[in-house]
Image: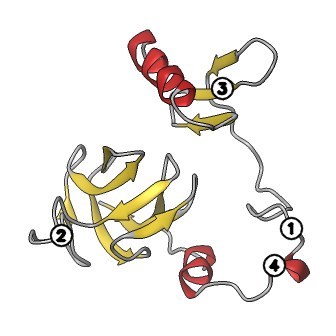
Amino acid sequence: MDIKDIKALVKLIMDTDISEFEMETDEDRVFIKRGSQQEIIHVAAPVAAPAAAVPASGLPMAQQGVCDASDSRAEATLGDKQERVTSPIVGTFYAAPSPESESYVKVGDVVDAGQTLCIVEAMKLMNEIEAEYKCKIVEMVKTNAEPVEFGDVLFIVEKI
C-alpha cells in the first residue's frame, strides 16, 4: 500500500463519523483511529494470527443467537485444495458490475490470477475483489447486494 492509498483512507475517515478503521491484506495491515486526540495511523506487515476463540461478533457463541446459513457454510471444513476468499473491507457485495449485467463469475468457472470475482462497495467506492491465484469457483457464499464485514467469506475456491 502506498502513501497515496493511505491518504485516501484518511480522507475517507475524516469525511465520515467513523472513529476506527482496520484493513488487512496479505501484504499490509492498516489501522486508523481518530477522536479527541491526535489521529494514529499504523501500517505494518501482516502477522499470521491463530484462529480466534471468540467469534467475529465478539459475543460468546451462546449469546449470538441463530447463525445465518451462509456463516455455517463458510465455517464448514474445506477440502485439501479449497480456500476461502474473504472480504478485505466492510461494504456491500455485488456479483456483477450492474444490475443488468451477468455475474463476474459463476460456480464451476475457472478464473485466472487477477481476474475480478466481485465488487464490494464501501461508501460509494466500488472495490473490485480479484483472484489471487488460478482457481475454480466451488461456492458463492454471499448473495448479490448482501452486506459484508471485514473477513466475511465471499467465495469458496479450489486452487488449480
Q: Secondary structure at mark 4?
A: helix
Residue for badge 3: 32
Mark number, residue 103: 2
Tell me the CA gap for discs 1 and 4.
Answer: 6 Å
Q: Secondary structure at mark 3?
A: strand
Q: Earlier in the sequence, mark 4 or mark 3?
A: 3
**Residue type at tag 2:** Ser
**Label 2, label 4: how far apart the Cα atoms are:** 32 Å
Q: Which residue is mark 4?
A: 64
Q: Which residue is mark 1?
A: 59
What's the CA distance linking mark 3 and mark 1?
24 Å
Dot 1: what SS?
loop
Residue at 22 percent across and 75 percent down: it is: 106
**Cα gap from disc 2 to disc 1, whole angstroms:** 35 Å
User: Is tag 2's residue or tag 3's residue first in the polypeptide sequence?
Assistant: 3
Considering only order in the chain, which callout, 4 or 2, is on the residue closer to the N terminus?
4
Q: Residues within 10 Å of mark 2 (few under 14, many from 20)?
A: some
Quadrant where the N terminus is found in the figure: top left
Amino acid identity at mark 3: Ile
Q: Nearer the viewer, residue 25 or 101?
A: 101
74 lies left or right of 115: right
Q: Are marks 2 and 4 in contact (CB under 8 Å)?
A: no
Q: Are marks 2 and 3 in contact (CB under 8 Å)?
A: no
- Between 112 and 16, the one lying in front of the other is 16
Q: Residues within 10 Å of mark 3 (few under 14, many from 20)?
A: some
Q: Earlier in the sequence, mark 1 or mark 4?
A: 1
Q: Earlier in the sequence, mark 3 or mark 1?
A: 3
Quarter of the figure with residue 155: bottom left
| Residue type highlighted by circle 4 | Gln
Q: Secondary structure at mark 2?
A: loop
